[in-house]
Amino acid sequence: VKVPDGDVLIHAGDFTWKGESHEIEDFNEWFGNLPHKTKIIIAGNHELPFDEERFERIITRINEGQKVEIPEGYCK
């Protein structure tokens, strides 16, 4: 992806497909290597790990109403 030079870079929306850790790590490495001094990221609806309440509701629904233990720090 060709990103134009600038002082501020804003990424708004999805940067993962499923919010999996390897997707987040890949994006972080790519985004972190861009030369912009200020970077702002707005998570999209695919970035479930960034929304603890929504993540818990969806995981509970997927698991047919059974409460699921979410690992400490996963949604932070």
Image (spheres, grey):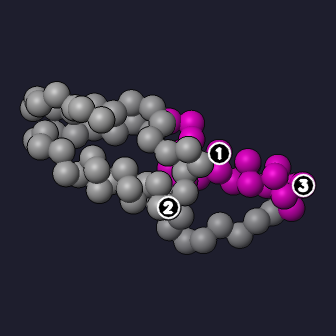
Q: Specify whether residue 57 is painted magenta.
A: yes
The residue shown at (43%, 54%) is: 24
Residue reaching furthest to the front: 1
Q: Which mark is residue 54?
A: 1
Magenta span main SS: helix
Do residues under tags 3 and 1 come within 8 Å of each other at their CB atoms?
Answer: no
* Mark 3 to mark 1 CA distance (whole Å): 16 Å
Left or right: residue 73 versus residue 29 is: right
Q: Which mark is residue 2?
A: none
Q: Which mark is residue 21?
A: 2
Residue 3 image position (x, y, % from top left) = 22, 32
Among numbered discs 1 and 2, the one appearing first in the sequence: 2
Residue 34 image position (x, y, % from top left) = 18, 45
Left or right: residue 72 versus residue 65 is: left
Q: Specify the quadrant of the image occupied by residue 70.
A: bottom right
Question: Three-letter amino acid code at disc 2?
Answer: Ser
The residue shown at (28%, 50%) is: 30
| Label 1 vs label 2, nearer the camera | 2
Few, some or many residues within 10 Å of mark 1 (<14, 14–19, 20+): some
